[in-house]
Each structure stands twice: as C-alpha cells, then as structure tokens.
Image (spheres, helix red, strand yellow):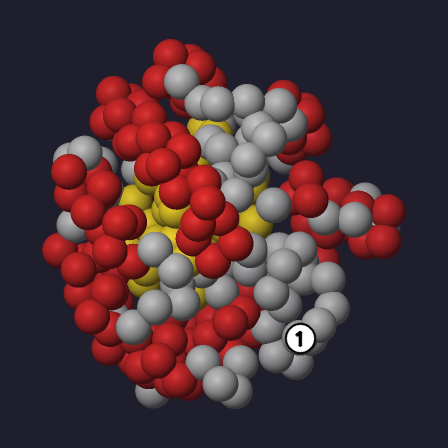
Amino acid sequence: MLVDSHCHLDRLDLARFGGLANVLETAATHGVTRLLSVATDLESWPALARLTEPYPQIALSVGVHPGEDGARPPTVAELTALGREARVVAIGETGLDYYYGADSADRQRDWFRVHIAAARELGKPLIVHTRAARADTLRVLEEEGAAEVGGVLHCFTEDWAMAEQALALNFHVSFSGIVTFKNAKQIQEVARRLPAERMLVETDSPYLAPVPHRGKPNQPAWVRHVAEFVAGLRGEPLEQVVATTTANYGRLFGVAVEAG
C-alpha cells in the first residue's frame, strides 16, 4: 500500500471530487490506503476533525502554518491539548516561509519555537514547512532541541546540503509532485541520494499536482505518480519505494501499517 504523508483534505474542493468518500475510493484504486491530513490553523481544526472522523485510514496533525498571518497564535498549552487527541500523530504544519512572509519573520520564528516545545512535550514528530528560510529553519530546529522528536521537512525544495543537515537533526525528507517537474534538478538529486530509511512521499494536495496532472487540482491518489517518479530516479522497483516509504511513515508517526 501507499501512504500520502501530507495532504490537506479540508482544502480540497470536495464537490468537484464527489465528496471525501469518493476521494478516498479513488485513492484506494491507486493503492493509496493511508493518509495524513495536515492542519494549517487552529480555527479550522475542529472542522477537519469532524470531516475525517468516519475514516480510520486518515491520521491528523495540529498546528499553524507559518503563512497564516491572521490565524490565532498557537500556544504550547493548546497544541499539547489537541495533540493528545487519539488521531493526532504530529505537530504542524509549522516552520518558516520568507518567500512571501519575510516581514513576519519574527512572528514566524516565535510560533515555530512554540510548536517545537509542544512536540517535545508530547513526544510527537514535527511537520516542517521551509521556504527561502534555510539558515533560520535549521538554526531554530537545533536551538530548540527538535532532534529529540524528529519529524519531516515536507515538500522538499532545497538541495543536498540542506538535506544532509536535516538528516543530522533526525529529520526525514518528503517529496511532493514538484520532484516530477522538469526543472526540479536539485530536488531530483536529493531523491537519488537520500537514504531510503529517511524518505517519504506526499501530494500536498490540493496543491502541486505531479506530472502528468500538473496544473490541475491535486488529490491523494496521485501520490502514486510521485512514488513512480522517485523509483525511476533511484533505479528501484516501485514496490520497493512503496514498501520503504510506508514503513518509514509508520515508524515516524507511530502508525501501524503493512508495508508493500
């Protein structure tokens, strides 16, 4: 089975896809039978929990995306309270994004530190977003002891040098549809070189649909295209990448899975 280790099911246009049940059925026909739906703010988290509650194959995270300037500020107390919910397997999406939000860098770093503190208190991994903020992302992770819980740099868009530093901090690297883009050479190099035991695949749906669906609304089923492309880059059978990334997901997030 395949795992979509990072999607935003509450951000999908579910009417377009015929409802969440249909999204999950389509995913299953592509071999995708586990999903992690990642939170982006605290205000919408209860609705996300209600939406996904009937589906045991969906795990959740809790956190506030660094780009959510108008969101309610996270506190360690609130994150840890929500993080104790049975289906919550990670803290995030958190991190730093200076590409659009350099003016809010101080606020982003403060919130990032709050998430790391909550993750350490809970003993749960972090889901980290980083864009145009390499040095500060690594510095905050190190300063706050994030290696104690580890986690994943999701939708990885950096180079091998950053990947190596992430590995040293006990983090995994996750590849999204971007790895399939023709101009994504440095990401493809990372996909070739990354130790298998630290690799995940994701869609980040409804964003960043992989080739051959680039430009369309993304969906969890299409993580198969990411896995197929990564397998080709690494010269490995698809079945091997599926088994490896599934096992890595289970180990990192504490989810019982059957690899393969």
Measuring from the top left, give residue 53's x and y in whole percent: 64, 27
Measuring from the top left, give residue 147's x and y in whole percent: 17, 41
**Left or right: 248 as drawn, with respect to 45:** left
Of residues 79 and 35, the one nearer the viewer is 79
Helix, strand or loop status at disc 1:
loop
Of residues 48 and 256, the one nearer the viewer is 48
**Above-or-below relation of 73 to 162:** above
Measuring from the top left, give residue 44's x and y in whole percent: 64, 27
Q: Residue at x 74, y 68 (%)?
A: 216
User: For mark 1, what is the residue?
Assistant: 214
Q: Residue at x 42, y 77 (%)?
A: 230
Q: How many marks?
A: 1
Query: Which of the image's four quarters has the C terminus?
Result: bottom left
Task: Mark yes or no: residue 145 visible.
Answer: yes
Which amino acid, by three-letter code, is at mark 1? Arg
Measuring from the top left, give residue 235's x and y in whole percent: 34, 87
**Above-or-below relation of 114 to 210:** above
Name the image quarter holding residue 160.
bottom left
Q: Residue at x 15, y 38 (%)?
A: 143
**Left or right: 94 as drawn, with respect to 135:** right
Q: Residue at x 81, y 53 (%)?
A: 17
Name the image quarter holding residue 94.
top left
Question: In this view, which residue lies farthest toward the front?
Answer: 103
Label 1 crowd (10 A; few <14 / some 14-19 / many >=20): some
